[in-house]
Image (cartoon, helix red, strand yellow):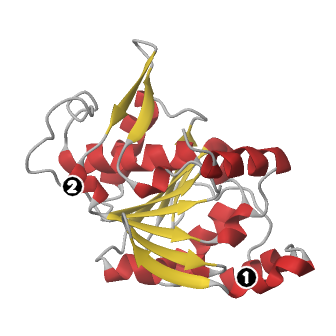
Amino acid sequence: QSLSADGEGLHRPPRPPHASMQRAISSRRALLPKSSRGLSSVAADWAFPVPVTFGAGRAAELPAKLRERGSNRPLLVADKGLSGTPVVGGLFDSLAAAGLQPRLFGEVDANPTDLNIVAGAAAYREHAADGLVAVGGGSGLDAGKSIAMVAGSGRSLDELEWTRPPVEEMSCPPLVLIPTTAGTGAEMDSAAMYTDTSRRVKFCVAHPGCTAQIHVIADPLLTLSLPPTLTAWTGMDAVCPR
């Protein structure tokens, strides 16, 4: 799915009517077990290995974080399964309500492909975007990072492959990464996996210049609608060493 704030020639993703980001935050707090609700007031900021804004409800700070970094026309990237949900819809609407001009690119497959990334980079350029927000588990986050590297540098995925010497004079736009699971860790650096559809092989792109542009918003409330099995799998992914 793809849409812009002005809606010209595009369609809004299906979702329940959106009242406000604050109402969505309140409803998600209500999903917490009573024994856990005290944890919803825990909030902190740190900068290792990248700047992180952590706390329940802090997704509402997204418009301010983008403005701080000079972005007013962000591309919002999510996978096909997440792009039509209230999570992405609420983030999109919060950006538009704050006066920003977002566009949604929601055509990412469950395992991002080179075709997804090329299409996303084209959407970034068509929108004249000046920043990127990636939302989701590893798929949405990896796709967003890859799109930012390709669109910002004008380089191909092959040129950005992680075993090659880093591309000099790398230009990467501001990146805000918003995880909706608690396990992939894809938000913590630039490394991003994708599938080369012609060779049927997975590759990784990465660049230190992209890592330097990352800011993470980790809002636990965004994980509450995850299916129980995925909650368990990604939780174990987070606590088990590899």
Q: Nearer the viewer, mark 2 or mark 1?
A: 1
- Residue 204: percent from left, percent from top: 36, 32
Work out whether residue 19 can be spotted. Answer: no
Q: Amino acid at mark 1?
A: Ser
Specify few, some or many for label 2: CA neighbours under 10 Å numbering under 14, 14-19, or 20 or more: some
- What's the mark number on residue 89? none
In the rendered image, the residue lying farthest to the right is 34
Q: Which residue is mark 1?
A: 40
- What's the mark number on residue 209? 2
Q: 47 or 212, which lies in front?
A: 47
Q: 241 or 181, which lies in front?
A: 241
Q: Amino acid at mark 2?
A: Gly
Residue 167 sits in quarter: top left
- Distance from label 2 to label 1 (Cα)? 34 Å
| Proximity of marks 2 and 1: CB atoms separated by less than 8 Å | no
In the rendered image, the residue lying farthest to the top is 199
